[in-house]
Image (tube, helix red, strand yellow):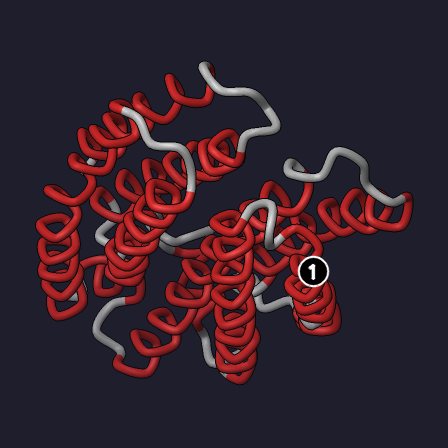
Amino acid sequence: MLIAILTTAGFTIYRVSTVDTTNSDFVFGLVLILNAVCLVAMVIDGVLRERPSELFILSVATVFILVYMIVNFAAGSQGNVKLARLVVACVLSPFLFVMGLIIAWEYHVSKHLIFRTVGANEMLQNLYRHLLVFQDCLKLDVQLAASMILLIVVPQLSLRTRDIVILSVGGAITFAWFFLGFFAFPKESKISAILFLLFSPAEIGYVCYKMYDVSHYIDAYPGLAGATIACGVLALCVRLIVIAGSLLVFRGFGNGLKEKLQESPRSSC
C-alpha cells in the first residue's frame, strides 16, 4: 500500500511541477497529494494499531482516488505521466481494496486492540468500538473538508471577500472542531461534546451552497466541477455519519469507558 501511494504521489508531484497553476491538473494534483499524505498516515496507524475501521476507510478511499484519476485523465489534458499514474492505480487498486478489506475484517473479528485496551467486558468493547469508528470517520471528514477547500479556492482567480472570510474562519473552526471531537469524546466531557454537536451542521450548508456555485465554471472545467460535486456529496454523507456516531458515543458516557481508557497505555488518547 505504501509503495502504491508513494509511487502515485511521485508521479503527481512531477505533474504538478510541470503544469501552470491555472490548469485543472494542478488542482487535481494538489488534491491527490493531500490525500496521499492522509492515506500514508492511515496505513501506518491502521496496521500497527490494528484499527479495522481505519483500514476499511483506507480501502474505500483508494477506490475514490482511482475515480479521481480516471475523471482527471478523461476530462483534462492527457500525457505519458498521467497515463503511467493511471495504469499503476488501475493495476494496484483492486488488489489493495480486497486485501485491505480482508485485513480489516481479520482485525474486526480478532478484536486485539479492543481486548488489550478494555478487556473482556462486552459492553465496554462495544462502546470502545463505537468510539474508534467515530474517530476514524472524523479523520475522513477533515480530509474531505481540506479537499473541498482546494477544489473551491485554487481554480478561482479571485475570491469574493465573503468567501475569503468564510473559508478562513471556517477552516480554523473545522480543525478546532476536529480536535475537540477527537479528544473530548474519549474523556467524556459533556460540555465539549455538546459544543462539538452544535458546530457539526455548520459545514453542511456551505458545502451545499458551493456545489450549487460550481455551475459558474462547469463549462470551463467540467472534470474539476464534477470532482467538486462528488467530493461535496461524499463530505456531506461522512458529516452525517460523524454526527450519528457522535450521538451514539455520547449516549455511552458514564459507563466506565473513560476510566478504562485512562488506565490503559494503549488507548486512543
Report the side of 153 relative to 104 (left or right).
right
Q: Residue furthest right?
A: 161
Helix, strand or loop status at disc 1: helix
| Residue 190 % position (x, y) | 67, 73
Q: Nearer the viewer, residue 180 or 98?
A: 98
Say how many tags the image has: 1
Q: Residue at x 71, y 55 (%)?
A: 216
Residue that numbered label 1 is attached to: 210
Q: Residue at x 22, y 52 (%)?
A: 50
Position of 224 relative to 103 (above/below): above
The answer, for residue 55, to whether it is visible in the render is yes
Q: Nearer the viewer, residue 227 or 95?
A: 227
Position of 115 relative to 167 (above/below): below
The amino acid type found where label 1 is placed reads Lys
The answer, for residue 192, to whether it is visible in the render is no
Report the side of 161 relative to 157 (left or right).
right
| Residue 143 % position (x, y) | 50, 49
